[in-house]
Amino acid sequence: MLRSMNSAISGLRAHQTKLDVTGNNIANVNTVGYKSSQTVFEDTLSQVVRNGSAPSAQAGGTNPAQVGLGVKVAGITTNFEQGAAQNTGRSTDFMISGDGFFVTRAGNEQVYTRAGSFNYDAAGNLVTPDGALLQGWMAEGGVVDTNGAIETLTVPFGGVMQPERTTTGAVVGNLSSAAASGTGVQTQITVYDALGTAKQVTIAFSKNAAANTWDVRTSDGTSTLNTQVTFSTAVGTEGEPATGATYEFTPTDGVWPDGIQIDLAELRQFGGPSSLAPARVDGNAMGSLQSISLSGDGTVMGVYSNNLREPIGKIALATFANPGGLAKAGNSSYRVGDNSGQPAIGEAGSGGRGSLIAGALEMSNVDLAEEFTGLIVAQRGFQANSRVISSSDEVLQDLVNLKR
């Protein structure tokens, strides 16, 4: 049998594989997070027709004469280049900008994916379209410990943020140094009791007849506290409170046994109009979870009905020493391969991991122009090898016809 026929057969097989890979790339041109593959060829063994020889004093050296025996697929590599971003506006669509993989759990197996299209299941878990559970770190008391073991991320819809009593507050701004005696300025702060009930506290300032002194009257409609604040005229501290920079206001309803510390240390008395505003008032009403938002480091923030935000958890990302060594597990996922190395799991934006973008998806990185060109090359290669088989067949036919 002619060597050319065997070589051509190996060429048919190799180019058929290239067609298969190219066809799969084109089929996944709109698959979220898909990474295209390329086929790499290499020649097989070569048959030595004549060995080479080294040069001598009497004759020059000769090169070996070798006939190749065909081609084989050396490997099918995955291109992990970043895909294009597509904005979706969905709060549960996440895109990795840079390196890294989402960590998911399918049954007892941990798999990895670049496809960031997630949804909620009936238990509030963030899941992939095929039901794999997104992994990360859950918050405890609003604090996320990324040094612990990862677990399934769950959004507790209907969860309640406990109310907290107001213990501190501040007033900032300016009291005009040109104000006449008896001039009044006031502001209001909203405070909360231990049950989360809101109460309006009015803090009224009235210019005292004494120089640089203002009377302060704090009232919630039931309890009233009168005090004073005096501003300094010393060089270097002009306009800053000299006395009365802090005081404690305690409502008489017994909900604030320790009172509310009111800080006036950042209040000033300068020339110009008077302007006051509340600042740094702690405490909050009860709130229920309404929605989530995502920050660039993967922190999932809960948005509550009391207009406060609190971390619910953080998405974990994994990187590999050799991503090309990952084994495809279907459903746009990968599993650890023999040559991928073990996953390095951590938070986004650290350790070479990319940042996260909410409301967007990473699309397939398939380049149709390149794929169609490769399709033509594979088709022509297949045709050329089939022509070699036809030519070899004609030669064999002539050989058989030598004896009639």
Image (cartoon, grey):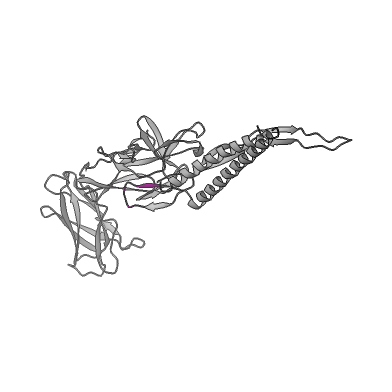
> On the rendered image, what quadrant is the N terminus found in?
top right
Q: Position of residue 207 (x, y in %)?
A: 20, 65
Q: Nearer the viewer, residue 80 or 403?
A: 403
39 inside magenta stretch: no
92 inside magenta stretch: yes
Q: Position of residue 58 (x, y in %)?
A: 89, 35
Query: Residue shown at 70%/34% (left/top)?
Result: 402
**Furthest-right residue in view?**
58
Q: Which residues are magenta?
A: 88-95
- 358 left or right of 192? right
**Furthest-top residue in view?**
108
Q: Can see residue 64?
A: yes
**Furthest-front residue in view?**
404
- 41 left or right of 258? right
Query: Residue shown at 41%/48% (left/top)?
Result: 30
Q: Which of the 4 image quarters holds residue 60?
A: top right
Query: Residue shown at 39%/43% (left/top)?
Result: 115
Main secondary-structure element of the magenta-colored stretch? loop
Q: Nearer the viewer, residue 71 or 191?
A: 71
Q: Nearer the viewer, residue 118 or 67?
A: 67
Q: Position of residue 156 (x, y in %)?
A: 25, 40
- 378 left or right of 136? right
Q: Which of the 4 image quarters holds residue 51?
A: top right
Q: Can see residue 161?
A: no
- 5 left or right of 231? right
Tally of numbered discs: 0
> On the rendered image, what quadrant is the C terminus found in?
top right
Query: Residue shown at 27%/52% (left/top)?
Result: 280
